[in-house]
Amino acid sequence: MDKDVHQGFETLAIHAGQEPDLTTGAVVPPIHQASTYKQDGVGLLRGGYEYSRAGNPTRTALEVCLAEVEGGARGLAFASGLAAEDTLLRALCRPGDHVIIPGDAYGGTYRLFTKVAEPWGLVHDPVPLGDVDAVRAAVRPETKIIWVETPTNPLLGIADLAALASVAHEAGALLVVDNTFASPYLQRPLALGADVVMHSTTKYIGGHSDTVGGALVTASAELGERLAYYQNAMGGVAGPFDCWLALRGLKTLGVRMDRHCANATAVADMLSGREEVRSVLYPGLPEHPGHGIAAKQMKAFGGMVSFRMGSEEEAVRVCESTKLFILGESLGGVESLIEHPGRMTHASAKGSPLEVPGDLVRLSVGIEDVDDLLRDLERAITAATR
């Protein structure tokens, strides 16, 4: 690709790292389902490949593409989002170090910090990241990372990335942003001062609920090289077929996100008008406390909507009453999903400062006909509150 010409997101998503195959001219990069590679002499690697844990051509294509669409220096693909997170923490932190995490964080992230990293000696504090002063007050001399989700999972909180980058860098810490909910199409944290972006590529990047993967993208090549060493040493790499599926998903990410966002806006507006619904959490709503910041740092407001019912029992009944919205964990696929975070994705946070409200329902709004989705939710809410 011509590096001297600025290219748009969709162009990069389709072409970056994905030149037609030199042997056949195939426009889709092949799946290199190989564990090892012939060397042209002892230590003479053809294309730099020796063993697929260290590098695989299909994975390279995905890593290059991810770096380009996030505007970063280096992309790294992993077997899952949590594999990416764990590798980053092991690479950048040591026992006794401190990390600030969201007061509303993904349950798997919280479990990683409390059950895996904490026994290793890594200290963490959950802080409401929408409050920049609270974050600044929580910084310690041993703070190495401010870990951000925006929007958060599942309460859809918004953090000011540029402001938090300043707080982190003033303290000599790094800003790491989980960009899974927004996707690189809607938000580019590196351009706002972040040092590392993390993704669960399982979600919007994959987009079809048929692959599991994770990614890190770094602002600097030096940091990318450090993480690449740990990626190889720890071995939680993405397999070639999963990389191929993520690349396929990236090609249509832009057009899919446009529909996700449009459908989610309509769903949030409908829910806001239902008297049975206690509150609607969606950064696209003007009354959302983070709406102004989200409008400044995001292209649109995403496909995730959460709402609160009058009771936990009603929330569970809503989740069990939909027909088109599938009761299931995960998010970001073309199909719409509904779940009860307190009993499903965030059950690991029960009894902790990150415990989510029992009456909360989380939606991953898909790309179906929006009128069908609205009817499905309206019927479920009516059935659940009779």
Image (cartoon, rainbow, N blue to C red):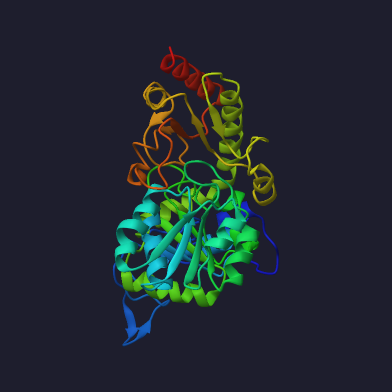
Q: Position of residue 307 (x, y in %)?
A: 51, 31
- Tally the numbered discs: 0
Q: Position of residue 315 (x, y in %)?
A: 41, 26
Q: Nearer the viewer, residue 41 or 274?
A: 274
Q: In the drawing, does residue 174 fall left or right of residue 338?
A: right
Q: Residue furthest bottom?
A: 42
Q: Quadrant of the N terminus?
A: bottom right
Q: Quadrant of residue 31?
A: bottom left
Q: Nearer the viewer, residue 323 or 95?
A: 95
- Name the residue: 51% across, 24% down: 373
Taking 169 as reference, is 321 above or below it? Answer: above
- Name the residue: 52% across, 23% down: 277
Q: Residue furthest top?
A: 386
Q: Residue furthest front?
A: 137
Q: Position of residue 234 (x, y in %)?
A: 32, 70
User: Is residue 54 something one can see in this rendering?
Assistant: no
Q: Position of residue 291 (x, y in %)?
A: 66, 42
- Name the residue: 56% across, 22% down: 371
Q: Quadrant of the C terminus?
A: top left
Taking 311 as reference, is 204 above or below it? Answer: below
User: Is residue 153 something one can see in this rendering?
Assistant: yes
Q: Quadrant of residue 123?
A: bottom left
Q: In the drawing, does residue 80 fall left or right of residue 285?
A: left
Q: Nearer the viewer, residue 40 or 52?
A: 52
